[in-house]
Amino acid sequence: LALLLRSGALPASLKVLHEQSVGASLGNDSIRSGIFASLIGFGLIVIGMLVYYRLSGINAIVCLIANLLILMGFMGGVGATLTLPGIAGIILTIGMAVDANILIFERIREEIRNGKTVRAAVDTGFSKVFWTIFDSNVTTLIAAAFLFQFGTGPIKGFAVTLTVGLLANMFTAIYV
């Protein structure tokens, strides 16, 4: 039995239940669906930020758009092709950017509740949350570095998109 298993010649018949041919348009359809889902998700994030944070949500939206512009500018500059792993990297970048904005805004709210002026609350909020944002982005960058080092083509594309998105996120979350 061990010899048969090692040789791969088991006396089993193959019964085809379903067969389907896939054309080259499947990849385009998947990418189109991924972009559409990303746009819907981004729209829901915009609505959620505006409803929950009101006018401060506009600042978060500007940060998200700046983040995406930097990321898309990089991808266009190096001639990158948009693939499904690349779309996943963009979506994860948006999630990390929203997380950074929520951390900042909640810390500012907490400082205002403690009686600080708006300007002092903003300064204190940014300074106290910087290391949290920095830590989360650096640990994700380390994971992206391992994915790039040990991954294959699509995984490397995801890692590059994620890395550029996280660097853009650090810039937009802190400076924009």
Image (tube, rainbow, N blue to C red):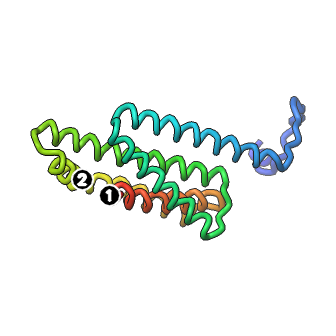
Q: Could you give the CA–CA distance between mark 1 and mark 2, rounded to whole angstroms?
A: 7 Å
Quarter residue 102 falls in: top left
As drawn, is 174 to the left or to the right of 75? Answer: left
Instruction: Give the residue at x 57% y 56%.
Output: 158
Residue most extreme to the top: 17
Q: Disc 1 designates what residue?
A: 174
The answer to whether one can see residue 84 in this image is yes
Q: Amino acid at mark 2?
A: Phe
- The answer to the question of whether label 1 and label 2 lie on touching residues, with beta carbons closer than 8 A, is yes
List the residue tagged with mark 2.
Answer: 126
Which x, y percent locates residue 17? 87, 29
Place of residue 80 in the rendered image (x, y in percent of width and height, measured from the top left) = 65, 64
Of 10 and 133, which appears nearest the observer?
Answer: 133
Lower position in the chain sequence, tag 1 or tag 2: 2
Q: Residues within 10 Å of mark 1 (few under 14, many from 20)?
A: some
| Residue farthest bottom in this picture | 78
Image quarter of residue 171: bottom left
Task: Where is residue 75? Give x, y as percent.
Answer: 59, 63
Task: Give the tally of numbered discs.
Answer: 2
